[in-house]
Image: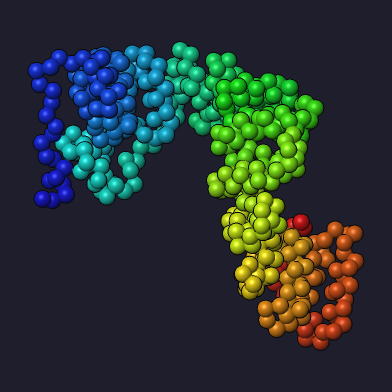
Amino acid sequence: MSVISRLFRKPATAMVGETPDFRRGLAAHEAGDPTTALRHWLPLAQQGDVEAQFRVGQAYVRGEGVARNFGDAAHWLRKAAEHGHVEAQFTLGLFLANGEGALQENAPPVRWLRSATRHNREAAEANLALLFPHGLGAAPDMNEALSWYEKAAAQGHAEAVYHLGLFHAFGQGVPQDYTAAAPWFRKAGDLGHATAQFKLGTLYAQGNGVPQDIAEALSWYEKAAEQGNSSAQFSLGMAWEHGQGVQPDPEKAAQWYRKAAEQDHPVAQLHLGLLYASGRGVPQDYRETLKWCRLSGEKGNSSAQFNLGLIYARGLAGQPDLGEAAAWYRKAATQGNIGAQVNLGLLLLKGTGGRPETVEAVDWLRKAASQGHVGAMLSLGSVYGTGQGGPVNTPQACMWYSLAVAAAPDAERGPIQEKVDALLQEMTSEERQKTEILIDEWRRSAPSATPR
């Protein structure tokens, strides 16, 4: 049987001898039987039942009891929205803002999909990506999206109000304007929308669209934090740790960090771990530092990964484990963490298993040096000057020491310049010329390097 012919098998048997009942459809849906639910709701939707129209639209959105189809979803949501159904208005606005379900009745892919999905859900889903790899091509309609959001917002739909604030904050469909965004965030915040409360707090903290007011920012952060918003909890932790609008209080900082950390906020986990490392607000306990940094590092936080490398390298929470240290440094270094690149390079020069890995070490040190890290430049100068892992290369050593002189603070340049002068005295004119060429080539290849 061909791919296309398999799409047009006999459709599922319709409900026979049973009167459509919205509540029975709802019970079926709650029992995990979306097909039966849709068989009850669809006839009611066709008869003009607004709630049924919304439920059928949701079914097409989620692919419950029917193949997911944004065009048909928008069709039913629009019917419900036009009768004032607030959730339908909001959902339809979301669709149109994202370019899903926009009206394109004459578009062949839409006609094909609607026809095929009525006959065979699985085959249609399996072949949609193959036959139409770029999707349905529906362009966002921001004007209509905003219109539906405004209708839902007028009925007090907090999420719709919040989204209107987002549109103004990010300039989607309207000019970017924090001043216009703030009233929408405030209205949503007054309706209890936690994320809007956090966003409004951030506007006050940064002075975007409103006068900068840290006390007002903290007030909104507290409203959001009390509802469990982890970003607001983290922001309060930062405020109490660093004294932003309040007297520093590491104990309160730890309390808020913990609330956010327990919700898997990776940066809060890192900061809580660092408080345990320093013993501020909590007892000093590197095992707790290890615990929280690991949770953060496993989510990809490069600073947490760097700190895990330190803990294992120094044996702060047990016996040193250079292999584990190198593994965490490498994760952070791959993300561009300069400290991890340097530490990994130095660790590899010593050898994590008793044997130096000079080639990889030099590669990581060069990455850090390209970002202006003076210590990495000095380490590279030492590697080439002593012949570690290979023959002595005096021009390369002189190049790195010379770059370090230029990048180092004034107070630290003297001893490094002495190394450069000593090497220049030992070198032939040809070697000095080669050094100048190497320096020029490096500066051309890494023009954005800044001292660190």
Quarter occupied by the C terminus: bottom right
Residue nearest the observer in this picture, 441 or 188 = 188
Residue nearest the observer in this picture, 154 or 158 = 158
Q: Is residue 21 left or right of residue 286?
A: left
Q: Is residue 200 left or right of residue 277?
A: left
Residue nearest the observer in this picture, 420 or 212 = 420
Kindly identify the residue that appears in the image at 64 percent across and 72 percent down: 354
Kindly identify the residue that appears in the image at 67 percent across and 51 percent down: 317
Residue 202 spot, x, y in % from top left: 65, 29
Up/down of 187 relative to 176, above or below: above
Q: Is residue 213 left or right of residue 6?
A: right
Q: Is residue 396 at all visible to an observer of this figure?
A: no
Q: How is the image coloured?
A: rainbow
User: Would you identify the image quadrant in which residue 201 lies?
Assistant: top right
Up/down of 217 relative to 432, above or below: above
Up/down of 153 relative to 296, above or below: above
Q: Is residue 378 at all visible to an observer of this figure?
A: yes
Label tally: 0
Kindly identify the residue that appears in the image at 82 percent across and 64 percent down: 406
Residue 314 spot, x, y in % from top left: 71, 57
Residue nearest the observer in this picture, 152 or 282 = 282
Kindly identify the residue that appears in the image at 32 percent across and 26 percent down: 58
Residue 436 spot, x, y in % from top left: 77, 76
Residue 292 spot, x, y in % from top left: 62, 42
